[in-house]
Image (tube, grey):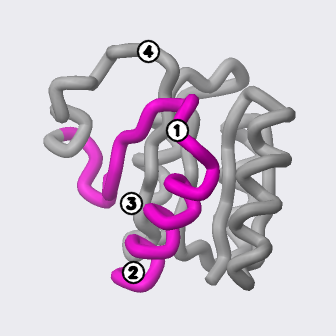
């Protein structure tokens, strides 16, 4: 399974990446909208772990691009805010699979990615 992580926090992306790689996944980490769309333009992606509060670009623009370019890719949103905590993200993003707090244990995030990746 190919997992694309798009997030600000480099420390967390290293931790998430290691957990996902231990499960046998191919993991690519980027930190901007431009890098995420460039990657998806050329490569298939099964799951995108996407920081909703992305500093370099728009997470929603990445999700929109993924729904067009990689419609089978499932998106696991990660956030450190309560914005969209009401679940409305699922009304706006057709391939949204989950919304988890940024401070979720890495094993939990890996399990969520694995579950939704099998469904893609």
Q: Are marks 3 and 2 in contact (CB under 8 Å)?
A: no
Tag 3 or tag 4, which sits nearer the N-term?
A: 3
Residue wearing tag 3: 67
Q: Nearer the viewer, mark 2 or mark 4?
A: 4
Relative image position of residue 117 (x, y in whole percent): 47, 76
Tag 2 or tag 3, which sits nearer the N-term?
A: 3
Whether 113 is among the magenta residues is: yes
In the image, which residues are magenta?
92-120
Badge 2 crowding class, 10 Å Cα cut-off, few under 14, some 14 to 19, many 20 or more, is some
Circle 4: element type = loop
Residue wearing tag 4: 81
Circle 2: element type = loop
Tag 1 or tag 4, which sits nearer the N-term?
A: 4
x 45%, y 70%: residue: 73
Marks 4 and 1, Cα distance to the nearest angstrom? 13 Å
Relative image position of residue 86 (x, y in whole percent): 16, 25
Q: Are marks 2 and 1 in contact (CB under 8 Å)?
A: no
Marks 3 and 2, Cα distance to the nearest angstrom? 12 Å
Q: Are marks 1 and 3 in contact (CB under 8 Å)?
A: no
Dividing the picture into quadrants, the one containing residue 9 is top right
Badge 4 crowding class, 10 Å Cα cut-off, few under 14, some 14 to 19, many 20 or more, is few
Tag 1 or tag 2, which sits nearer the N-term?
A: 1
Marks 1 and 3, Cα distance to the nearest angstrom? 25 Å
Residue wearing tag 1: 104
Residue wearing tag 2: 120
Badge 1 crowding class, 10 Å Cα cut-off, few under 14, some 14 to 19, many 20 or more, is few
């Amino acid at each position: 399974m190919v997992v694309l992580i798009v997030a600000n926090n480099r420390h967390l992306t290293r931790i998430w990446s290691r957990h996902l790689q231990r499960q046998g996944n191919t993991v690519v980490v980027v930190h901007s909208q431009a890098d995420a769309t460039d990657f998806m333009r050329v490569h298939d992606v099964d799951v995108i772990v996407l920081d909703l509060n992305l500093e370099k670009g728009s997470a929603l623009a990445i999700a929109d691009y993924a729904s067009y370019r990689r419609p089978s890719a499932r998106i696991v949103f990660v956030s450190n805010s309560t914005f969209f905590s009401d679940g409305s993200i699922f009304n706006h993003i057709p391939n949204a699979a989950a919304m988890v707090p940024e401070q979720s244990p890495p094993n939990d995030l890996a399990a969520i990615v694995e579950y939704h990746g099998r469904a893609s």
